[in-house]
Amino acid sequence: MQSHVMELAYKALDLHEISYCQAIAHYIKQKFDEAYGSAWHCVVGIDFGSCITHSCGSIIFFQVEMMEFLVFKDGKDLYESKDEAVGVLQRAEDGQL
């Protein structure tokens, strides 16, 4: 999935102007929904913040050229996802991130 999403990011950047972040994100989200089922989300841009709930093991953040990509699947098990998010926040507060 990691290599697939990166391939899609490069293809999306070839298909769309770099300033059309929404079109790039829509392309990646649509392809991931087709390949891996629904409930995928994609955020594309430069220097953005986020706070999300996601399924464990179903999130990737990476950079291609100047663009940053955040792709994740919506969390079905809210308790497991919430616990993982709390763990990330605690590590950040402890200076571990």
Image (cartoon, rainbow, N blue to C red):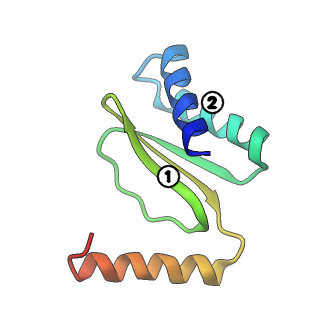
Report the disc number at residue 40: none
For the point 35% across and 55% down, the residue is 49
From the image, tell me which residue sits under label 1. 60
Mark toward the start of the polypeptide (2 vs 1): 2
Kind of residue sitting beneath label 1: Ile
| Badge 1 element | strand
Marks 2 & 1, CB-CB < 8 Å contact: no
In the displayed structure, would residue 55 be above or below residue 1? below
What residue is drawn where x is 62% and y is 30%? 27
Image quadrant occupied by the C terminus: bottom left
Q: Position of residue 90 (x, y in %)?
A: 34, 83
Residue at image mark 2: 27
The foreground one among 53 and 55 is: 55
The residue located at (41%, 44%) in the rendering is 62
Q: CA distance from mark 2 to mark 1?
A: 16 Å
Q: Position of residue 42 (x, y in %)?
A: 55, 45
Amino acid type at mark 2 = Tyr
> Considering the numbered disc 2 on the image, is that residue within a helix, a strand or a loop?
helix
Disc nearest the viewer among 2 and 1:
1
Image quarter of residue 8: top right
- Looking at the image, which residue is at 42% across and 81% down? 87
